[in-house]
Image (spheres, helix red, strand yellow):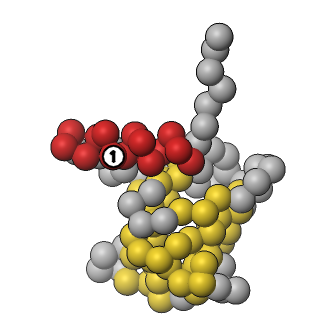
Amino acid sequence: MQLSLQHGVFQLDADRPLAVRRAKGVWIECLAGRIWLTVEGNVGDIVLAPGEFYRVENNGLTLVEGLPQGAARLLTETAATPRATSWRRFAQKYFANNAFPCAS
């Protein structure tokens, strides 16, 4: 894994996970390739493609890894808020990865 501190971008490889702890509320954005996440306490794993986001919902251990390679960045709640012009794309990708039960 390589970390570019200038841009806050993580270059991720398979079998070399980035361990993230105490990150409740942090957004993980896939910038290139595909990334795999497993979050302590979650039943399933998450795979993100470029332009997709995932919000960490607890402070447990989160592992982020390339599938087989990928690039990601971590964003705070305010930094992850999309600009108005990209809101629709952001919402579509977010809800595709984080389905919520619908009330009847």
Above or below residue 75? Residue 24 is above
Q: Which residue sits at x=67%, y=46%? A: 58
Q: Which residue sits at x=19%, y=43%? A: 85
Quarter occupied by the N terminus: bottom right
Crowd rating for badge 1 (residues with CA inside 10 Å; few <14, some 14–19, many 20+): few
Q: Is residue 42 left or right of residue 10?
A: right
Residue 50 percent across, percent down from the top left: 42, 66
Q: Pointer 1: what residue? A: 89
Above or below residue 48? Residue 103 is above
Question: Mark 1: which secondary structure?
Answer: helix
Q: Looking at the image, which residue sits at the far top?
A: 104
Foreground pick, 74 / 82: 82
Amino acid at pointer 1: Arg
Q: Looking at the image, which residue sits at the far left?
A: 85
Q: Is residue 85 left or right of residue 25?
A: left
Q: Which residue sits at x=42%, y=42%? A: 92
The quadrant in which residue 5 appears is bottom left
Say if residue 80 shows up in the picture. Answer: yes
